[in-house]
Amino acid sequence: MPADIRVKICGLTDPVTLAAACDAGAAYVGLNFFPRSPRYVTPAAAADLAVTVPPGVAKVALVVDADNDLLDAIIGTVPVDMIQLHGHETPARVREVQGRYGLPVMKVIGIADRSDLIALQDHWQVADQILVDAKAPKDAVLPGGNGLTFDWSLLAERRWPCPWMLAGGLTAANVGEAIRLTHARQVDVSSGVESAPGVKDADMIRAFIAAAQS
């Protein structure tokens, strides 16, 4: 597994672990604007974090079924580089967000079994990137960040016309195997580098990035 694997550390909430992620080689850092998440940050707090991110590291705004008012508040306050849509957004909504804000959009698609792959086809011609995540259970409070994996063999030998990222229950212990099975060139982690829900751990972040790139 070559060192050009790109890593996204999502749900960062404090400057210490944000700096640790950047220093360890993260290509993306995620700021979570979903109020029910333990990783939630306000636009004002996110703006303070975003200005510390060094050039070359993409700042990603994660939202869930956000309306234009919320997105206006985020984009007008926080200097983000990409919008991550983690709800039930349609391809038409993806296009609308792209056009309104002039930013690349990453659409999250949850996978539980082979039938969920159809949703990938609906979005890959529209989204700038696809994030393939474990599908949340029906009673889950959060659409992601639940520490769940899915059958990685569903993605084996598949290729899509836009860049994509693998997420879902990844940790320093399993990310190497996940990359080997899926041939992912990008991986995303949130709960897998936390000591408690919403509490990022700098050592776990460094270990995860090292494992992904080793």
Image (spheres, helix red, strand yellow):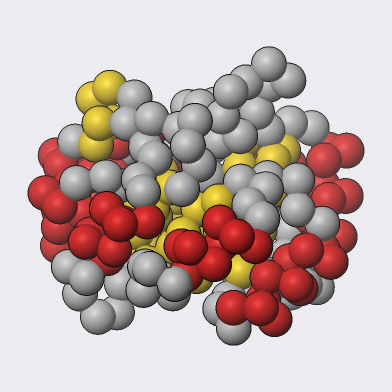
101 versus 134 height, above or below: below
- Residue extending farthest to the top is 139
At a point 29% along the width and 63% down the height, the residue shown is 47
Measured as percent of width and height from the top left, residue 41 is found at 35, 45
Left or right of residue 171: residue 187 = right
Closer to the camera in the image, 210 or 68: 68
Q: Does 39 appear above or below 132?
A: above
Nearer to us in this view, 2 or 115: 115
- How far from the left and from the top, in percent, is residue 157? 71, 56
Would residue 72 be seen by someone viewing this image from the given angle? Answer: yes
Is any atom of residue 177 visible in this view? no
Quadrant of res 3: bottom left
Q: Nearer the viewer, residue 93 or 177?
A: 93
Q: Count the marks.
A: 0
Q: Quadrant of the N terminus?
A: bottom left
- The C terminus is located in which quarter? bottom left
**Residue 39 rendering spot, x and y as whole percentages:** 37, 37
Q: Residue at x 88, y 50 (%)?
A: 118
Q: How far across and how far down the image is residue 189, in percent?
A: 41, 44
Q: Residue at x 24, y 36 (%)?
A: 200
Which residue is painted at 19% across and 46% down in the image?
Answer: 14
Q: Who is closer to the viewer here, 122 or 31? A: 31
